[in-house]
Image (cartoon, rainbow, N blue to C red):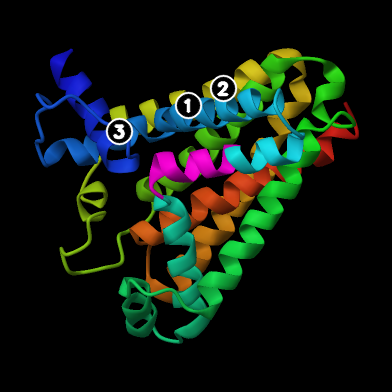
Amino acid sequence: MKKEIDIFFTALMFYTRIPCPKNINHNPDYLNKASRYFPLIGWIVGSIAFGVFYLFSYLMAPEIAVIFSMIASVLVTGAFHEDGFADVCDGFGGGWTKEKILLIMKDSAIGAYGAIGVVLLFLLKFQALSYLVSPSGMLSLESQILIFLLFVSAHSLSRLAAISIVFTHEYSREDRSSKSKPIAQNYSWREVLGAFFFGLLPLLALAYFQWLFLLVLVPVFLTRFFLARYFQKWIDGYTGDCLGATQQVCEVVFYLSVIALWKFI
C-alpha cells in the first residue's frame, strides 16, 4: 500500500503543481509506474475545474465562470499539456525532418504556429464549454451531477487517450535528456489496466444517465489513432509533447462530441 501511495503522489507531482507530502519516496522507477494514475489525475483536475466553475457561476455569467474554470485547470497542471500542444504545433508546423521537428519541439521559445494553435485551442474549448453549461445546453437537465461528470470525464478520457500511445508506440528521442523519457521505458499490465479503469469509469458513470454518452469514445479514440499515426510517420514514435498535445486535442474533441450527441438526447 505504501508503494502505491508513493506511485500515486509521484504522478501527482509530475503532472500537476499540487503540493505533495515531503516523505514520499522519489524512486525513479515510480515515474513509469505512475502512468496507471494519469487518468486519475484527470479526476482531480476536472473536479477542481468544475468546483471553480460552480463557485463563479453563482457570482457572474456562465461564460466568465468557464474562463475562471479554464484558468484553474491551467494553474493546477502548470500548463503542462498546453505547452506540449504548442511545441507540437511549432515542431510539426516548422520542421520537415525528424531531427528538425524534435529540435524545434525542444526549444523553450514559442513560435507563430504554437501561439496561433493555443489561441484557437482555447477558443474552441471556451465556446464548447460555454454551450454545455448554458441554460440552452446541458443545464436544461437541471443536473449539476451531469456537468461535474462531463468535466471529469473529459479530463480522464483525454488522458487515457494520451497515455495509451505509450502502450502502442515507441519513444522517439534517443537521448535521455527528456523528463518524459522514464515513462517510455517499460510498462506492465498494471499500468494498462489502471489507466483504462480510471480513464473510463467517469464516462461509465455519465452513461448511467444516458448511454449515448458512450459514443464519444469513437471520435476521441479516432483522434488518438490519427494523431499517433501522424507522429509515427514524421518522428517514428512520440515524445512527451506529443502526449500533451493528444490530451488537449482529445479533451476538445470530447466536448464537441457531447455537443453533437446532445442533439439526439
Using the rendered view, name the quadrant where residue 265 is placed.
Answer: top right
Q: Is residue 49 above or below residue 186?
A: above
Amino acid type, label 1:
Trp
40 or 72, nearer to the observer: 72
Q: Quadrant of the N terminus?
A: top left
Query: Pointer 1: what residue?
Result: 43
* SS assignment at label 2: helix
Query: Pointer 3: what residue?
Result: 12
Point out which mark residue 202 bears: 2
Residue range (magenta): 69-78
Is 75 contained in the magenta span? yes
**Total of numbered circles in the picture?**
3
* SS assignment at label 3: helix
* SS assignment at label 1: helix
Q: Residue 240: x and y, percent? A: 34, 57
Q: Is residue 92 above or below residue 182?
A: below
